[in-house]
Each structure stands twice: as C-alpha cells, then as structure tokens.
C-alpha cells in the first residue's frame, strides 16, 4: 500500500509547512493593506498646520520639489503640500 504525502511527512515537517504558508499569506496581506485609498485616510490637498506630505515619513518625492510624489501607504499621486490622517513625522 502506497502512503500519501501527508502520511510520509513527520508531524514537525507538516507543522513547519503550515507555519510557512501562514507567514506567506500574512506578508502578502500586509503588502496589500498598505495600498490605501485616499478616501480611507482623509486625504486633503491642503496641509494641516505644519504637517505636509513632503515632511511625512511615508513620502516618496517626485522629480522636483513641486512635482507630485508618492506615498508608501496610499495609492496614487500625492501632492507635496497635501495631508492625510496617517501623517507621521519623517526621521
């Protein structure tokens, strides 16, 4: 009688494979979760006091200081002078 793959795996190997799959799913889910819609973070084109996208820790600058940039957490083009609810100080 031929054993199936599950029958041939030790308990430790089986559990290890399950942990690896779970970790992979969690990492993939977190990567998708980082791409938030602007509406979900209360994005606005105006700064909030001295809080601006271009001094946020998630800011990815455009080609010039005035150019639209990107955010590591929010989808789409981001204005340097804009603000959103997940603003965090750079540095």
Image: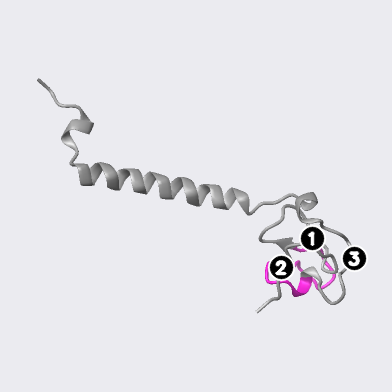
Residue at point 76% right, 55% down?
Answer: 41
Location of the C terminus by quadrant is bottom right
Give coordinates of residue 7: x percent, y percent. Answer: 18, 31
Q: Which residue is mark 2?
A: 59
Q: Nearer the viewer, mark 2 or mark 3?
A: 3
Left or right, 45 with reference to 53: right
19 or 60, which is in the foreground? 19
| Residue 68, above or below 22 | below
Contact between marks 2 and 1 (CB within 8 A): the answer is yes
Quarter location, residue 89: bottom right
Tag 1 secondary structure: loop
Q: Which residue is mark 3?
A: 46
- Which contiguous range is marked in magenta? 54-69
Q: What residue is drawn where x is 68% and y is 71%? A: 57
Q: Quadrant of the N terminus?
A: top left
Q: Earlier in the sequence, mark 2 or mark 3?
A: 3
């Amino acid at each position: 009688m031929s054993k199936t793959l599950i029958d041939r795996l030790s308990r430790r190997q089986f559990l290890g494979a399950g942990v690896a799959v779970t970790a992979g799913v969690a990492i993939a889910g977190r990567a998708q979760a980082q791409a938030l819609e602007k509406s979900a973070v209360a994005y606005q084109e105006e700064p909030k006091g001295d809080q601006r996208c271009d001094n946020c820790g998630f800011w990815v600058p455009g080609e010039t200081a005035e150019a639209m940039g990107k955010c590591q957490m929010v989808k789409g083009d981001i204005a340097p002078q804009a603000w959103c609810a997940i603003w965090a100080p750079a540095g």
